[in-house]
Image (tube, rainbow, N blue to C red):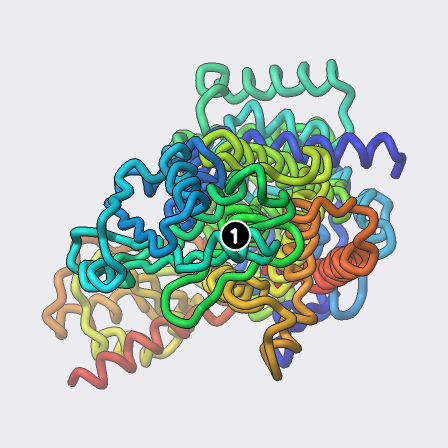
Amino acid sequence: MSRLKVLRDILAVMTNEFGVFRRNRSAIVISLVVIPFFFTASLGAGQGGAGTTFRPTAALPIAFVDNDLSVASGRLYETLVRSEMFNRLIQGYREDNALAALGKGSIYAAVVVPKGFQDRLMANQPGTIIVYVDDGAPGVGNAVLSAVNATVQTYNPTTEIPTSTYVEVEGFSTIQIVQKGARFSGFALGLTITMSLVIVFATFYEIAGGMSREREEGTYARLLISPISLGAIMIGKTLYDLGLNIVRAIVVLGMAIYVYGARPNTDFVTLLAITVLISLLTMGFGLLISSLGVGVRAVVIIEFFLILFLFAFSGFILDKELMKGIPQIIATYLPWSYGIEIFKRTVLLGAPLLSLTFQLQFVGLSIVLFYVLSYFLLKLARERLVG
Amino acid sequence: MTKAFGHFTAVDSLNLRINPGELFGLVGPNGAGKTTVVRMLCTLLEPTRGTATIAGYDLKREAAEVRRRIGVVSDGISLYKDLTIEENLKLLSTLYDLPRDVGQRRVRELLEMFNFQEKSKRLVRQLSTGWTKKAMIIAALIHDPKILFLDEVTSGLDPQSAVALREFTRNLCDQGVTVIWTTHNMQEPELICDRVGIISEGELIQIGSPADLKRSVSEQAVIEADSPALDAITIEKIRDLKSVCKVAYDDPILRIACMRDENEDIEEKVVNVLVSSGARIRAIGKKDPTLEDAFISLTGGEEEIDRFIEKGRERT
């Protein structure tokens, strides 16, 4: 078979996939609009955005308790108000009154500046502020902390205080949020996982569900009785799905940057490259699952577990390094967790993509393994798939 | 060729030669193995033992060459429902490596031949069963195959379309295309096929022209009665009559295959049984055996009647 024929076949399969997709309006809406928007908007709602455009805390009544009564604490109040993230910052509460008011709906959070705040800053030590949040209002805590965090980045106590000084934000009860290394908001962190989830969620169903549907409807058999190689079918479908994922990545990033003010520490090409990697990984896995001859319903169930695994073991809830026992083993061998790690290190820390050799190798090898395995399994299972 | 699925042998030692330009009918009851034969010959299934040469190419070693030369219309092989017939054909003409102008001309010709021009922009899912079937035939012909497999192709078609399709197929054969027509409908092969192979339980039990096959049961006579609502006991009584070989009852038509006997008027005896059972006889007469009779005789189609009688016994 000539190379030109193979290329034409690949192109034909890809064009065909787009043709089918074009006719399916609900697939377009769900795949390219609902999923990316839903995930990104959920993240935005939960984390309160990363920049200045989205201000979920602007209208919340929040107490500002100044126990230091210093110039620095006054400047902090001004900084918070000027940020326009805290348009209803109320002064005059005592700390005990503010705590008593929390949970009753009159205030949703209290920002407390402890005594000695200015002295610590003057001594070139981190100044601490305490943020009490209403646990009864889901999402408010994260939103307030994220907004305070984002605001204090621009805080300049006085010209007399060295610029290396920074302010730590202490959360409610015993949790202290200490930022190490680069400073990034919960939104920026969530964005990396959201990107991965959007890609995995849509891609797996598209590739594995698509193959199962083709098998059930008899179009896969039609391809198999025509002179086209299995490799061309796989590559054609892969290219089609890559195209969709690039659109998805643009939607998610566009929304994150222009609506929620995210500032990724990497360039667009790197982001697309990572998108392609995670897409290929998921597509390889999807093809592998479809080679088992499962039906569309089974694909949905597998997708559910895949997403669940990603949530549980890819650093969405807990970092891989913090896990122990079986969860850590799963997280260590789950290729997607390395995909997310690549996202984190590039988007959050600005690490060059090619410097992440181990992660790239792990993901790359997983892609090759998935594709090679699925190629042979699809060949072996040919009869079962059309029987 | 033999094809086994685990312990079940779907096709057992099939050995046949089909000549170029021949319209070959492969008939058999449901589950006889017809579709498995087609699926093996169109490279979807690999024979467990044996092989075949199709248009000069070995089925196993030169599958890609075989695929270029065959067209298949079968229930498990469909078109993309979310594409128009024209888009489906465009895809196929690329896969079959037709030059663009040849592909376009071929699509135009086929659409015209099947009066499909007006519907060519419609999605396949919007077509009726008959039109979908036609679309699948067009798709099977896009690359001008040397061999065409038509598996139960007239099921779901209205009588006019079925007649038109039979004529079209006959013309294709006249142009040198070899057609393998599989069906469980006995009338079709009798009307159009050059030769017919009867397959039952995976074995090819008889092969020949429709006339040959009918002659093979020429020692038989067939009595056909129009008698509604017969019970199992009456049918059993008829079957117990001397000279009766097979009895088939598809309410209200009762078909009795019996040996020709100059000394015995079997028709009268059948009438007596029916009358004594209180059955209504709207018509009765002798007929020459059809291909269906040959088929029943060869495949033991009496099983259905046995099941019917068994059920009757259970009821009484």
Residue B192 appears at what percent x and percent y?
56, 39
The residue at the point 19 percent across, 64 percent down is A100
Amino acid on which disc 1 is placed = Val
Q: Residues within 10 Å of mark 1 (few under 14, many from 20)?
A: many
Q: Nearer the viewer, residue A33 or A56?
A: A56
Query: Which residue is under mark 1?
Result: A167
Classify residue A250 as left or right of residue A60. right
Q: Is residue B209 left or right of residue B280?
A: right
Secondary element at tag 1: strand
Residue A179 sits above or below residue B170 on the image: below
Residue A218 in sight here = no
Q: Nearer the viewer, residue B119 or A326?
A: A326
Q: Is residue A23 above or below residue A145?
A: above
Q: Residue at x 63, y 34 (%)?
A: A243
Residue A313 quadrant: bottom right
Q: Quadrant of the N terminus of chain A?
A: top right
Q: Position of residue A223 (x, y in %)?
A: 66, 43
Q: Chain of mark 1?
A: A
Q: Nearer the viewer, residue A112 or A346?
A: A112
